[in-house]
Image: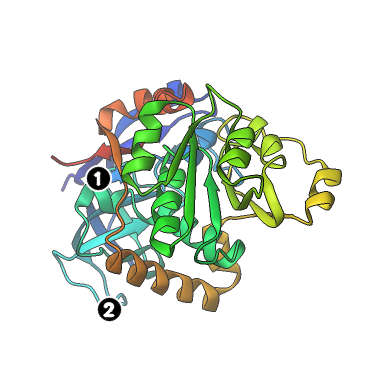
Amino acid sequence: MTAALSSAAICEALDGPDAVQISRLPLVPLRAGEMRVRLKAAALNFPDLLMTYGKYQFRPEPPFTLGMEGAGVVEEIADGIPGYKIGDRVLVKSKTGAFAEHMTVNAQMVEPMPPHLTFEEGAAFAVTFMTANVALIDRAKLQTGEILLVLGAGGGVGQATVAWGHAMGAMVIAGASSDEKLEIARQSGADYLVNYDREDFAKAVNRITKGAGADVILDPVGGYCFENSLNCIAFGGRIVVAGFAGGRFGILRPDLLKAKGAAVVGVRAGEFGRRDPAAGKRSHARLLEFSGTHNLRPVIGRSWLLQDVPGALRAMERREVSGKQIILIEK
């Protein structure tokens, strides 16, 4: 009997988006403790692009299927994975594998999909909103009424952080490189908008805060954005480093950090839970409760078909995208 085939976006070499091919792969039988999910949508994240060059912290050897998160329906269940039934709507998360029609997962890779989300929203939800959750609460200890500056506010992590900070009662200043991206931040609850392609965002923040600066700065961009953050951090403030979408991390000036009595902390939400499973469970429970209570949703910037994954990666590399980029697996 011929095995059923499933399409997937495969990175064949570490040469960037042009090395990604859409291939048909056989579905292998499930083992105990596994189930198969028929994916409806998946979400593009910056680490997907980095992995095509071998530049992410996790460096899989090609060939591998791209995609860190998706949403779909349980299609098949093997023994040893209780709590789910065929037809359940679920979120899947992994370091790879979600840009495919089917994904084989274990219990640690799947969770029930929040009922207030569509499949497209669900696919885009887990990585970015968990990052915002861990960054603001577990790492930055953001308090109600504090001033939060979110850089890269039109991207996935930035938009999620704006929405989360607004729901917490912070005063949110959103910084982005275009008015289109700032519109996403405005929709997500930003109080002030700063286009840092037109003005120095540190000067704008100091003007808005009457010289006090931002208590917490979320930086997923790096480079100049990180370096300039030191010029508008409040005394005792916290700069949270969430990535380097701009291509480099930036240079830390300890003299400015010392003068402000400030701190720089990194965030890796997935590793946070893996290193401390109890804290990870608490953070995850908070994510589901808080997002449902405040109706937090990702803003979808554009939807791409599975065969268009290379083009979606190239658009992200050229920083032509705003909002969360979705890969539609099944219409």
> Residue 301 at what x, y percent from top left?
30, 35
Which amino acid does the dot numbered 2 rest on?
Answer: Pro
Q: Residue at x 55, y 63 (%)?
A: 142
Q: Nearer the viewer, residue 85 or 148?
A: 148
Question: How many numbered tags mark residues here?
Answer: 2
Which amino acid does the dot numbered 1 rest on?
Answer: Ala
Q: Which residue is drawn at 42% across and 23% down?
A: 314
Q: How far apart are marks 1 and 2 (CA)?
A: 24 Å
Which quadrant holds residue 60?
top right
* Residue 32 seen in this snapshot: no
* Residue 74 seen in this snapshot: yes
Which quadrant holds residue 111?
bottom left
Q: Is residue 103 above or below residue 19?
A: below
Secondary structure found at label 1: strand
> Residue 161 at what x, y percent from top left?
45, 52
For this orientation, the residue located farthest to the right is 255
Q: Residue at x 63, y 36 (%)?
A: 202
* Quadrant of the snapshot with the C terminus: top left
Q: In this view, does 127 lie above or below 108?
A: above
Camera-near label (1 vs 2) is 1
Residue named by callout 1: 41
Q: Earlier in the sequence, mark 1 or mark 2?
A: 1
Q: How crowded is mark 1: few (under 14 residues within 10 Å), some or many (20 or more)?
A: many
Q: In this view, does 243 lie above or below 274?
A: above
Q: Which colour scheme is used?
A: rainbow
Give the numbered dot on residue 82: 2
Question: With 186 as the anchor, is 246 left or right in this view?
Answer: right
Question: With 176 as the anchor, is 30 left or right in this view?
Answer: left
